[in-house]
Amino acid sequence: MFVDKYPLLTNLIVLIVALLLVFIAYVRRKINTAAFFGTLMLGAGIVLTLGREYSYAGLFALITFFFFGNLVTKYKYETKALLGVAEGNKGRRDLKNVFGNGLSPLIFAILYANYHNTIFLLGFSGAVATACSDTFSTEIGQARGKPRLITTLKKVPVGTNGGVSFNGLVAAMLGSGLVSIACLTFRLAIEPQLFLLICTLAGFIGCIADSIFGATVEDRKPLNLNKHHVNILATLFGGVFAIALGYVLISYLQITHIDQITQILAKYALDVFNRI
C-alpha cells in the first residue's frame, strides 16, 4: 500500500491537508485566533506522540471530526438561533472547544507513546468518535428533536442539559460511525468490521455518558462543571469504553470476527425462545 511504501510522504500529505483545513477555517472565521493556535498545538502533540507509524491516522481522524463537526454546526443554524441554543459567535469555535474535545484523544496518544500498546489507539479512536457523536447529537437533535431528560425521560425544553431525542440519538450514531470509518486508517490487528462495531458503539455510549453528566453534574453544585469539562469526561469515558469493550471481546471472549458475535447472539436468542 501507499502508506507502507511511502510512510513519510503519507504523513507529510496528511499534515499539509490538516494545516490547510485549519487555516481555511480560521480565515473563514470558523475558529478564533486562540482556537487556531490551540488546534496547531494539538496537531503537533498528535504527531509527536503517535510517531511516523500512526500520526497520519490520528490526524485524519481529527480532520474528519473537525470537518464534519463544523459542517453540522451550520445545520438549521437559524432555527437553533431562534431557540437560543445555537453555538455562540455564529458557530465560531474557541480554545475551550478545542481542548474540550481534543484533550482526551491527546491523553490516549501520550499513553500510546509511553507504553507502545496499540490498545490506546483504540481508546484514541473511541474518544474522537465520542466527540463527533456528541456534536452531531447536539447540533441535529436541538434543531429537530423533542427532547426528554435522559435520567427521568420527562419532556424538557430544547437545550436543557441532559436532554436527548430520537433524532439526536440517530445523529449521534451517524457522527460516531463517520469517525470510526476514518479511524480504520490505524489498521490495527482487528477485523475492520469488528473495529467499526467497537469504535462506533464506544462513541455512541460516550455521547450517552455526556448526556448523563449533563443531567447530573453540569452547572450543578458542588462541582459546577461546564460543558467543556463534561466533554472531556465524556470523551475519556468513550475512549476507556472502547478499550474495555475491545479487551472483553478480543482477549476475554476470543472474538476475532464480527460473525462470531452474530452467532453468539443467535444462540442466546434461541436458548431464550426455547425456555419460553
Image: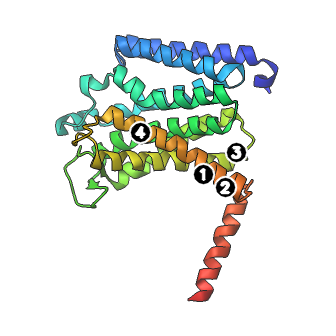
CB within 8 Å, label 2 to label 1: yes
Q: Is residue 191 left or right of residue 113?
A: right
For marks 3 and 2, give the CA distance: 14 Å
- Identify the element where label 3 is drawn: helix
Q: Amino acid at mark 2?
A: Leu
- Identify the element where label 1 is drawn: helix
Give residue 135's quadrant in the image.
top left
- Identify the element where label 4 is drawn: helix
Is the C terminus in the top left, top right, bottom left or bottom right quadrant? bottom right
**Among the two numbered marks 3 and 2 on one chain, the one whose residue lies closer to the N terminus:** 3
For marks 1 and 4, give the CA distance: 18 Å
Q: Closest to the observer: 91 or 36?
A: 36
Q: Is residue 217 left or right of residue 25?
A: left
Q: Is residue 121 left or right of residue 27?
A: right
Q: Which residue is mark 3?
A: 192
Give me the residue at 49% from left, 32% from top. Answer: 104
**Among the two numbered marks 1 and 4 on one chain, the one whose residue lies closer to the N terminus:** 4
Q: Which residue is mark 2?
A: 249
Q: Amino acid at mark 4?
A: Leu
Disc assigned to residue 245: 1
